Image (cartoon, rainbow, N blue to C red):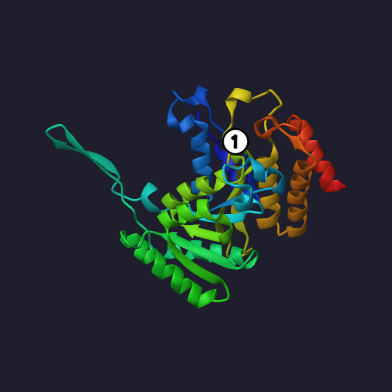
Amino acid sequence: GAAISDADMEKAMAADAVLFGAVGGPKWDKVPYEVRPEAGLLRLRKDMELFANLRPAICYPALAASSSLKQEVVEGLDILIVRELTGGVYFGEPKQIIDLGNGQKRGIDTQVYDTFEIERISGVAFELARTRRNQVTSMEKRNVMKSGVLWNEVVSQTHAASYSDVKLDHMLADAGGMQLVRWPKQFDVIVTDNLFGDMLSDIAAMLTGSIGMLPSASLGAPDVKTKKRKALYEPVHGSAPDIAGKGIANPIAMIASFAMCLRYSFGMVAEADKLEAAIAAVLEDGLRTKDIFSDGMKEVGTIEMGDAIIAKFLG
């Protein structure tokens, strides 16, 4: 067997966009890797050549009190983290564990970035910033890593050559993590490498009050003829097998992922804005699925929440 068939891959490659549900769970833990659901997702990312991962961290006003930080720190938060997805230490070679003898071993991972990888991911960040608040913060560790030195240089060169209208700041990644917790609203778009992006996007996600409500997008390079990018959209949360079939899962991340699809793959910005506003309005009305429920709110199931958002969107 295979996690995803060649026929389904052909459909994905021909589509304008792929909307992907959450996958995984303990029932697949002991099966061969190539048939696990995660292998299908990784094949999609690889074959579609998706190199730019977009992770928004948005704190809806109605949920500001649910964050682990003070309400005034996170209320109105709207950050977009642009993570390079195909390079860096997760894919660099050599990657191995070697036996040194005398009971000692050495684990080796290699952080590698080429100029073109940094140029294209920073270009995505600058382009997105132009549609938002026109500010990019690039994060790396140039003080201790040569890849960070190159990252800093190439981002600066790309900015000077094509995006000088966008405000650019540089920040060490560890300081960036600290600033995300101290005063996150100082950021608009953050661009960073695979490893730091993995960490920083999870930190940013927890500022919002619920990781179960956050969408994501993965984009490829523009097609030479059509200028369209291949793209995959999915919720950040996992599959939550413990509540499968109970009708209580929060559908907001999936709906918000579709809003990202409208925005980035179809250019339907007004419709995306309207759908995101519908989500905010339903939360303002006090409707909550079990994962975000609090006293004084009305607890609803998956279908009720989805129907309420659709009604707001159409109303």
Residue 157 horizontal/vertical position (percent): 44, 74
The three-letter amino acid code for the residue at tag 1 is Ala
Q: Name the residue nearer the viewer: 100 or 67.
A: 67
Q: Name the residue nearer the viewer: 243 or 89.
A: 243
**Label 1 residue SS:** loop
The structure residue drawn at horizontal position 50% and vertical position 73%, both measured from the top left corner, is 159
Q: Is residue 166 above or below residue 124?
A: below
Q: How many numbered discs sit on the rendered protein?
A: 1
The structure residue drawn at horizontal position 81% and vertical position 37%, both measured from the top left corner, is 307
Q: Quadrant of residue 95?
A: top left
Q: Is residue 168 above or below residue 107?
A: below
Q: Name the residue nearer the viewer: 93 or 136.
A: 136
- Circle 1 residue: 22
Horizontal side of 198 relative to 284 (left or right) equals: left
Horizontal side of 262 relative to 153 (left or right) equals: right
The structure residue drawn at horizontal position 76% and vertical position 51%, both measured from the top left corner, is 277
Horizontal side of 117 relative to 289 (left or right) equals: left
Residue 45 horizontal/vertical position (percent): 52, 47
Residue 263 visible in the snapshot: yes
Q: Quadrant of residue 76?
A: bottom right
Residue 270 horizontal/vertical position (percent): 77, 58
Residue 55 horizontal/vertical position (percent): 57, 50
